[in-house]
Amino acid sequence: MSTSTGPRTAAEPTTRWLDAEEQQAWRSYLRAGRLLDEELRRGLECHGLSHPEYEILVRLSESPSRVLRMSDLAKHVVSSRSRLTHTVSRLERDGLVVRRASTCDGRGVEAVLTDRGFEVLEGAAHTHVEQVRTHMLDAMSRSSSSPSARPSARSRTASTRAATPRSDVRFETCVTPGGAR
């Protein structure tokens, strides 16, 4: 992006432009995030799930009785209620989730993880966790992944390594439990 060096008006904000090093760090972060998202997407696709669908199943599995109000679920997965409704509709169509009136007050709607949904989640979790380890956590040094390490340092380490093209890396489409591909 080019910057104007002309006269400023009083209403124009002062922009702190990124220098070359900051621009490289930002672009490395974006690239690493996109590469990681793509790998996670491919792995979950093998189980018939999108990443948002997987996250919904995870959140339901972690809640008491595998039930959450739709409004709370939307907050947990950082989604609009409308988008969540569409995604839960797909999960419901596949028999992974059911919706019902709230058992507390009857006014809200709850999403409930079905036994079939839990089985699908169990299978997908092995793939997902292995890919998170392989494509993110293993890329970080043990010292930078300690609980006391600063998140920004961990992000920089992972994004720098992930953003560096490597000719020796070959991504597999599916990883199943036990490491079979």
Image (cartoon, rainbow, N blue to C red):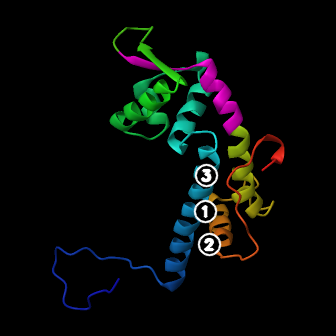
Which residue is pictured at 38% across the width and 34% down the height?
86
Residue wearing tag 2? 163
Which residue is pictured at 55% across the width and 25% down the height?
96
Residue wearing tag 1? 152
Judge the density around disc 2: few (<14), some (14-19), many (≥20) Cα neighbours within 10 Å: some
Q: Is residue 48 magenta?
A: no
Give the percent coordinates (x, y) of residue 79: 41, 40
Residue wearing tag 3? 42
Horizontal side of residue 154 vs 60, given as left or right:
right
Q: How far apart are the two marked residues, 3 and 1, measured between alpha carbons?
A: 27 Å
Secondary structure at numbered mark 3: helix
Q: Is residue 150 above or below residue 117?
A: below
Q: Earlier in the sequence, mark 1 or mark 2?
A: 1
Q: Is residue 111 magenta?
A: yes
Horizontal side of residue 179 vs 161, given as left or right:
right
Which three-letter amino acid code belongs to the residue tagged 3? Arg
Q: How far apart are the two marked residues, 1 and 2, measured between alpha carbons?
A: 16 Å
Give the percent coordinates (x, y) of residue 74: 43, 33
Q: Earlier in the sequence, mark 3 or mark 2?
A: 3
Give the percent coordinates (x, y) of residue 7: 18, 89
Give residue 161's quadrant in the image: bottom right
Which three-letter amino acid code belongs to the residue tagged 2? Ala
- Callouts 3 and 1 close, C-beta under 8 Å: no
State which region is magenta.
108-124
